[in-house]
Amino acid sequence: MLTFGFSCASTMGRVQFKKRLLTLSRRQTAMSGLATLTVLAFIVSGGWGVSSSQDCSYSGLLTHLNLVPQNEALSIVRPVKNWTSTILVRLDMVLLGILDVDEKSQTVTTHVWIQTVWLNEFLTWNSSNFCGIKTLTVPRKMLWIPDIAIQEGVSDTGSDLESPMVTLTPNGMVFASKRQRLTSTCQLDLYLFPFDVQRCNITFASMNYFAESLELGTTNSDETLTLVSERLMVTQGEWQLTNIAINNYTLTKSVFSESRLIYTVTITRKPMLYVVNFILPLFYFLLLDLASFFIRGEKLSFKVTVLLSISVLLLILKDMLPSTEENLPFMASYCVAVFTLVGLSVLEVMLVNFLMELDGYCGEQAQRSVNTREVEIQLEADSQKQPAGAEERGRVTLAKTPGDHRDLLKLILEEVRAARQETGRPEDGRKPGCYTRLAEIIDTVYFVLYFLTVVIYLACLYISWQGHYTTLG
Ligand SMILES: *[C@@H]1O[C@H](CO)[C@@H](O)[C@H](O)[C@H]1NC(C)=O
């Protein structure tokens, strides 16, 4: 054996020698492992004439591992020596960013980094035999790679940033990593929007291998991955990563079973933007509308303006929320309630205005009759005074003819008018018609009801929201 190897080395060229080496290693199974190794070491050192006793290039290691394009078995089948053994694939996912949460299409776009580790039983070496080589990086396509896919994934092609290389370690572990702009579907629960907490599952499973051949697991615990994600997270947008939980189980269908690894990512929305932009303005509009009951005079245009402002806010809400009829978000019910309340109060103001005007029309006629009656009374009083009043002689003589009587009447009327103008139309306040009184009652009752409704509604909303919020998270 030994002499054979030596003579080969001395007589053949390098290329031929390599070929021979390959055939040698293929025959490996026939020989005892130790003898082969010593032979190889002897040939390598003697054949190339390297001054040091060891080969410090990668090619020696490649040769040892038989990692050559011709060795297709390495990239075709699962790297196990016994076909019945299960290969454990450990998959660690770290969240690098939360890019977008689309409420309309119910998708979450994240930036993730995924490292996959598994054992290749054929690719082990003793690093002390190879100048202490601890890692070897080879093209991905030379090796078998597990076909793990994300079930919720709806990413575009090209969103994967897969490393073209994989790294090997002496104990046969293969490390493959990739970064991905992952768009995954997620059932978003928007009831508590904008105070919502979303839980999204990212499920990893092999596309072809059953659980007997391929099992999924992780290297690190949930806590570690959450911590690392929090440290590495660059962009979060309006979201805050709360937790990453890992679950792995075997899903058994009728004849076969499938190993699954589920990452449940919990994210919480930062609600401040919506509070400042949406909830507070709506609340203030409601307060303004309440306060407008104290406006004396024209209220209608003010109220309609408030109503218009609220409908602008409703338009913004429409752009944000999807139509999930079965579970109306509490934000939407809040908006609709505020809109309805303000709308009703506009109607009420219309009714009150109408009643007032009706009263004004009747009042004019009533006023006229009251005036004539007053004049009559005045006249009677004057005529009774006439004989008694000695100082008013001249006037009485003047008033004897019917034409002069009318002049006196006019005079009195003017005096009455002047007096009324001085006191500033006391008739409207002092003697309101029945409709005005009705309108005032309606206005007051409506205001009290409105106020109570607003308070009770807001209290109920807060209580139900609090209940949901505490149960959720
Ligand atoms: C997400 O995964 C958890 C844990 O396995 C499971 O209980 C839950 O039903 C899953 N959610 C969805 C929406 O699939």
Image: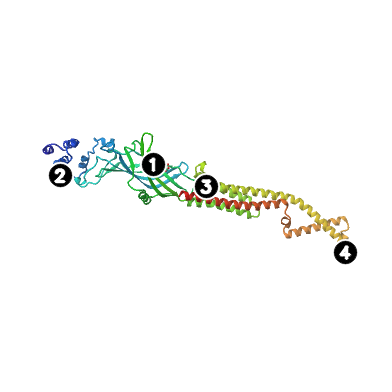
Name the residue tied to disc 3. 330
Q: Are marks 2 and 3 in contact (CB under 8 Å)?
A: no
Name the residue tied to disc 4. 388
Q: Are marks 1 and 2 in contact (CB under 8 Å)?
A: no
- Furthest residue to the top? 255
Q: Which mark is residue 50?
A: 2
Closer to the chain start, of discs 1 and 3, is 1
Image-based side of 9 in relation to 315, left or right: left
Q: Which mark is residue 326?
A: none
- Is the CB atom of the residue marked by disc 4 within 8 angstroms of ligand 1's nearest atom? no
Between marks 3 and 4 in the image, the one whose residue lies nearer the viewer: 3
Between marks 4 and 1 in the image, the one whose residue lies nearer the viewer: 1
Q: Are marks 1 and 3 in contact (CB under 8 Å)?
A: no
Secondary structure beneath dot 1 equals strand
Secondary structure beneath dot 3 equals helix
Between marks 2 and 3 in the image, the one whose residue lies nearer the viewer: 3
Residue 391 percent across, percent down from the top left:
86, 65
- Is the CB atom of the residue marked by disc 2 within 8 angstroms of ligand 1's nearest atom? no
Residue 112 percent across, percent down from the top left:
37, 45
Query: Can residue 323 be seen in this snapshot?
Result: no
CA neighbours of label 3 inside 10 A, class few (<14), some (14 to 19), many (20+): some
Location of ligand 1 given as a quarter of the image: top left
| Image quadrant where residue 26 sits | top left
Q: CA distance from mark 2 to mark 4?
A: 155 Å
Q: Are marks 2 and 4 in contact (CB under 8 Å)?
A: no
Q: Type of residue at label 4?
A: Ala
Closer to the chain start, of discs 1 and 2, is 2
Q: CA distance from mark 2 to mark 3?
A: 78 Å
CA neighbours of label 4 inside 10 A, class few (<14), some (14 to 19), many (20+): few
Of 431 and 195, which appears nearest the observer? 195
Closer to the chain start, of discs 3 and 4, is 3
Residue 271 percent across, percent down from the top left:
47, 51
